[in-house]
Image (spheres, rainbow, N blue to C red):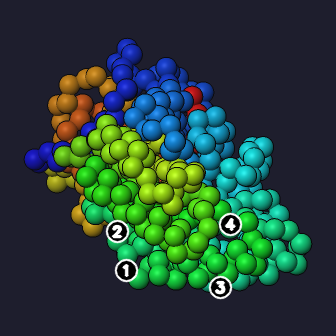
């Protein structure tokens, strides 16, 4: 069986006594501490290093918001509170999580289509900035605020007439359920301001999971130009501009890391030549996957080793119910291998080709196809990397009744 390439293992992971080390601990120690597999492990040192790397290239004027949807594990959120300037949420559940952490709601903005009235009310009461996704949502917000006798904090999410080229998920350009078409934004902003709302600015998110620095630079340039034009048409200073993000991480064979230095240089130049309409505007990027994705590893134990028609299968106690994306069932058209390793034999020679599958009764439950790996047996631990974002919370944990995986921040 000809091997199929695996995705690149993120930098910073090493071996000790043959085992993968995460956050200074071997996988066997981590599994013993958790008392179980499957297990997601998130490394603080990786989170810190990624934010430091980002801060080193960004101009000081640009803040960094953490998109909670990427990883809402409470200890991760608590750690990110000390690293990020603000938070972006997409539900009242995420808002309640931040409140339970004692995070200042003035640091929080709430985006996403289909916000329910109870969610709008909770956000108005808490002082969260609501990124309005439609005229109807804006009217409901004003009505709820009037009933509560509270001045709402509102921004407008813009559906721009351009997109982020090469992004994994396009969130702007053309007909979209997200945001308000750019040409309708000035009228709505003027209406909100006249109605007495606290005007908080614009949110322009064009796409996600982009690895082409030139495409991201182009999108950011377009965002700045659009925000300046809309601000001029609205006729009042723009308090804040959420420029979105879209920074991707390498998942698959052939993927190359995003060129942060090129992005930082372009943003520095853009800041030095800002249009006058944005001279005093607070600027921020909204990032999730880029901040936490490579800091997480999914650990699952091999419970059976079997051969069918000459093909070796390593059957684990995990699977797509925890790592839907790694199985190829979360937005990908052609399934490609994530970075995968035998964590308990991390530095051993690769001497066999095997399929790594999960415990579910579906042929979709695949963690690695035709992977070249060290020989592994029952009891060995498999590591799936790039599991820090859209893993535990974006997978069908209750599918077939196996339940959720454990989670640790180390």
Q: CA distance from mark 2 to mark 1?
A: 8 Å
Question: Which residue corresponds to mark 2?
Answer: 163
Q: Pick the quarter of the image with the C terminus.
A: top right
Apparent side of residue 179 relative to residue 3 in the rendered image (left or right): right
Within 10 angstroms of label 2, few (less than 14), some, or many (20 or more) residues?
many
Apparent side of residue 313 relative to residue 28 in the rendered image (left or right): left
Within 10 angstroms of label 3, few (less than 14), some, or many (20 or more) residues?
few
Q: CA distance from mark 3 to mark 1?
A: 20 Å
Question: Which residue corresponds to mark 4?
Answer: 199
Q: CA distance from mark 2 to mark 4?
A: 25 Å
Marked residue nearer the N-terminal end (2 or 3):
3
Question: Which residue corresponds to mark 3?
Answer: 136
Location of residue 335 (image quadrant): bottom left
Within 10 angstroms of label 4, few (less than 14), some, or many (20 or more) residues?
many
Residue 76, x across and y down, in percent: 60, 40
* Label 1 vs label 4, nearer the camera: 4
């Amino acid at each position: 069986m000809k091997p199929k390439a695996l995705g690149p293992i993120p930098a910073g992971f090493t071996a000790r006594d043959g085992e993968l080390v995460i956050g200074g601990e071997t996988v066997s120690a981590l599994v013993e501490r958790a008392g179980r597999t499957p297990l997601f492990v998130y490394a603080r040192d990786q989170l810190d290093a990624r934010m430091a790397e980002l801060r080193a290239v960004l101009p000081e004027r640009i803040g960094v918001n953490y998109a909670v949807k990427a990883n809402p594990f409470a200890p991760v959120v608590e750690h990110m509170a000390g690293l990020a300037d603000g938070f972006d949420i997409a539900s009242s559940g995420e808002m309640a999580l931040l409140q339970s952490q004692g995070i200042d709601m003035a640091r929080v903005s709430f985006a996403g289509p289909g916000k329910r009235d109870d969610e709008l009310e909770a956000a108005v009461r808490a002082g969260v900035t609501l990124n309005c996704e439609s005229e109807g949502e804006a009217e409901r917000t004003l009505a709820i605020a009037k009933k509560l006798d509270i001045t709402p904090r509102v921004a407008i999410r813009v559906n721009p007439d351009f997109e982020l080229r090469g992004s994994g998920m396009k969130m702007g350009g053309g007909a979209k359920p997200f945001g308000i078409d750019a040409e309708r934004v000035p009228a709505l902003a003027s209406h909100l301001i006249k109605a007495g709302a606290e005007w908080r600015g614009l949110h322009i998110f064009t796409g996600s999971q982009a690895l082409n620095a030139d495409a991201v630079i182009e999108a950011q340039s377009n965002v700045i130009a659009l925000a300046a034009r809309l601000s001029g048409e609205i006729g009042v200073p723009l308090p804040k501009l959420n420029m979105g993000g879209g920074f991707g991480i390498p998942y698959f064979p052939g993927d190359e890391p995003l060129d942060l230095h090129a992005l930082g240089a372009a943003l520095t130049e853009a800041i030095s030549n800002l249009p006058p309409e944005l001279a005093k505007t607070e600027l921020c990027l909204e990032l999730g996957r880029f901040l936490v994705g490579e800091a997480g590893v999914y650990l699952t134990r091999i419970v059976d080793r079997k051969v069918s028609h000459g093909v070796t299968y390593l059957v684990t106690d995990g699977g797509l119910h925890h790592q839907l994306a790694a199985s190829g069932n979360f937005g990908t058209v052609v399934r490609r291998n994530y970075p995968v390793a035998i964590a308990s034999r991390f530095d051993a020679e690769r001497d066999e080709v095997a399929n790594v599958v999960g415990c579910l009764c579906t042929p979709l439950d695949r963690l690695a196809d035709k992977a070249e790996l060290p020989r592994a047996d029952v009891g060995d631990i498999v590591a799936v990397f790039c599991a820090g974002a859209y893993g535990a919370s974006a997978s069908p944990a209750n599918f077939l009744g196996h339940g959720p995986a454990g989670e640790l921040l180390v």
